[in-house]
Image: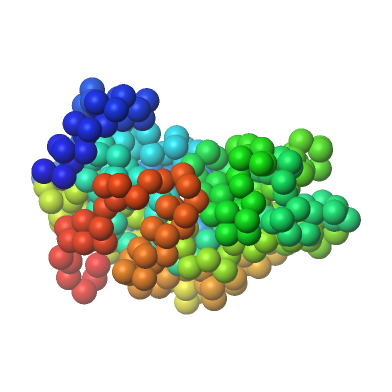
Amino acid sequence: MRRSRLLALGCIAGSAFLLAACGGGGAGQAPTADSAGNYKLTELDATTSLLNVPTYAAQQSGAQFHIAITTTSVTGGGTANQEFAGGTGNVLVAGVDSPMRIDQQGVTDMTVLGSIAQTNVWVLVAKKGSNIHSLADLRGKTIGVSGAGAVSDIALRYELIKAGVSPSSTKIVALGAAPSQLAALQGGHADAVQLLSPTLEAAIKDNQVQIVADFRKENYPALVLSARTSDVRSNPKAFCAYMGAVKSSMTKVMNDHTYATQMASSLMGSAYTSAQIQTVLTDYVQNRYDPTLTFTQTQYDTAKSLLIGSGVVKGQNFPTYQDLTQHQPKCGPSA
């Protein structure tokens, strides 16, 4: 009912994002079991980072839960939303803004299965020695974000408005992952950019940057697991198997540093040194990861306030907390 009503409104409005839905977008293929009762499921990962270690580890141990997990990685923000809305993947691993906005725009009803990260992870920096020391100094400046509509973009706009700075008085540009943003800063293509660990720590250690604003203080779920509600209702056992694998992996990542480091190194390849990975994992285990994978009403309220306060998202037809959680599968203790 809710999807049909909103989709009809979207088709009338003619938004480019919603027009894809008018042609049948949002219809994915629910995971099904083979003759042995094993499921196959595909994740769509938005801008893969070390936050994804628990879900990556679940891919390696999925067989224990009778599920084979594969991944497709895309840029976060609007790209990830459009891919998932168009039917790619069974589970979307992205900031909480993604399922909220897909649901709000009427493409398909979404269910948030759980939360991997319980805070934001981005930090706004400028060159060391720059005259940019606060958000108030950003008027007329070029500022980097990971992707248009991504967590980094929305959080930046929200914090600018809170500081009395109109986002329109700045130039906000999508620069991709943290290393690319740092390169843009170093090359003079941006006045301030957003970094996350371990690029942040390395740049600070090398005396390249100074912190302008630390968005990690926001209680904003930077990474949640979500799925199309129709898929969850069609085959809840598949999603219980998936959540069982992720919860098991999260527990091991939280309690076994050697295992977590191995998984992180395998996920990121040679992008980071072992020392950098260990620094990041220590921070994530202590401050970012949610070992319970619970998506709470408080997290929802924080996210809604930030999304609407950013000016990017309107308050009309916004999904409620119940809309996003009432169809979570009822799983046993292992999940």
Residue drawn at x 46%, y 44% is 312
User: At which x and y percent is residue 305?
Assistant: 42, 60
Of 130 and 58, the residue lying toward us: 130
Determine whether, in the image, residue 253 is placed left or right of residue 21.
right
Residue at 37% in and 25% down: 16
In this orientation, does residue 247 appear? no
Measured as percent of width and height from the top left, residue 43 is found at 35, 45
> Could you tell me residue 32's position as x and y percent?
16, 44
From the viewer's perspective, tell me whether residue 57 is left or right of residue 328. right
Render colour scheme: rainbow
Q: Is residue 7 left or right of residue 153?
A: left
Which residue is drawn at the image coordinates 26% and 61% (left, top)?
321
Can residue 330 be seen at all in this image of the molecule? yes
- Quadrant of the image containing the N terminus: top left
Q: Residue furthest right?
A: 129
Q: In which quarter of the image is residue 103?
A: top left
Q: How many marks?
A: 0
Which corner quadrant of the image does residue 223 belong to? bottom left
x and y percentages locating residue 222 in the rendered image: 47, 58
Q: In which quarter of the image is the C terminus?
A: bottom left
| Location of residue 19 (image quadrant) | top left
In-front residue for pair 151/259: 151
Q: Residue at x 47, y 55 (%)?
A: 309
Q: Is 131 or 144 nearer to us in this picture?
A: 131
